[in-house]
Amino acid sequence: MISDKASPPDPDVLSAFERNGYVVLRDAITPEWREQAAAAATRMIASDRLTGRDRSADGKDGFRGILDDTFLPLVANPTVLPVVVALLSTNVYLMSSNLIHLPSTAPGTPRTIRVPERHGWHRDMSTATRDLGIHSVRRMAIKAAYFLSDPTPDAGITMVVPASHTRTGPVTVPAGAIDPPDAITPDVGPYDVMLFENRLWHAGGLNTSGRPRLAVMMQYGYRWLAPIDDPAPELLQREDLDDIERQLLGQPDRHPDGSIAHEGAGAAPLRTWWEHLIPPPARSPG
C-alpha cells in the first residue's frame, strides 16, 4: 500500500515545480519493473490491438488506457503521488494513462513534424485554453512521464521551456527553427520520472538514436475534470485495489450501497491518507 511507502514531499521539489512548471523525481521506478514494462509495451505496440490505439501522421504509435497488471502499479506510485497531491489537492484522480512509441528518424530523412512549419510546441488541455482564454487557465493537471527506453540526449525526450507555465502567450520559435531559444531537455535518468503541468510549453524531441523511444504518461487532474481515456469500469471491480487506488481510478461519490454521497465524498481515501502523512502542526502551549 502507498501509505506504507510514501513520505511527505520535499519542499525543495515543490518549490522547483512552482518555479519551473516541471520537476524530475529520481529513482521513481525500479530497474526490474522498468525492464518488465518495456517488454510489455513492446508487445503491445507489435500487437494488432485497436482498442485505445493512438496513431498519428508523424509516425507515432501508442495507446490510451493501458492500465493492466504491468502498469497498474504506477497509479499510486509513492514517489509521485505525494508531490501531485501537494501541488493540486486530495480531490484528484487519474485522467489518462498513455503509452507513446516514437520511432527513430535517420539523419536526412524527411519529417512531418518537428519542422519549422509544424514544430510541435504546445500546452496540454488546449480546449480549456480555447474555452476559458489563456489568461484564465490555471494548473488543473499534472503529467508523470516515465521513459522505458534509454533517455539519451538523442532519444527524443520531452523538451520544455522552464517557467513557461506563467506566460500569457505562446512561446516564440525563431523563423526557420524548431525550438524556442530557451528550450531545454531535462536531465532524466532511466529510473526517474518527470512531472509537468498542463500550462507548461513542451514538445517531443527529435529521436535520432536508432531505436524507438518508449514513454508512459500518467496524467492526474481534479476529479471534476472529464477523463481522457475511455471508461474502464472493470478496473474498479478488481479485488486487489485499495481505497486510494479506487479513488484514482475514478470511484464516484457513492455510498457502499450505491446511493449518492455528498459531493467530494469519493476523495475521502486520499484526504484521510494526506492528513496522516502531513499532520497539522502542534499547538503551542499557553
Image (cartoon, rainbow, N blue to C red):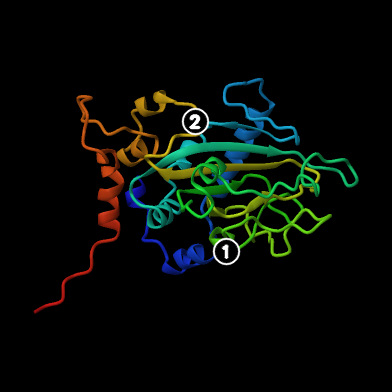
- Return the residue nearer the eye: 167 or 24: 167
Disc 2 target residue = 68
- Residue pictured at 11% horizontal, 78% vertical: 285
Instruction: Return the x and y of residue 1 as percentages of the image width and height.
Output: 35, 45
| Above-or-below relation of 30 to 7 | above
Q: Residue at the location (51% across, 55% down)?
A: 135
Q: Which part of the image, by quadrant, shows the C terminus?
A: bottom left
- Amino acid, disc 1: Ala
Q: How crowded is mark 1: few (under 14 residues within 10 Å), some or many (20 or more)?
A: some
The answer, for residue 214, to whether it is visible in the render is yes
The picture places residue 104, in percent across and down from the top left corner, at 79, 42
**Horizontal placement of 86 versus 52: left or right?**
left
Please name the residue shown 56% across and 58% down the image.
168
What's the residue type where badge 2 is placed?
Asp
Whether residue 25 can be seen here: no
Q: Can you give x and y, in whole percent of width and height, for residue 119 in the image?
A: 75, 48
Disc number placed over residue 163 in the picture, else none: 1
Total marks shown come to 2
Q: Which of 119 and 100 is in front in this view?
A: 119
Question: Distance between the Cα atoms at labels 1 and 2?
Answer: 35 Å
172 to 96, vertically: above or below: below
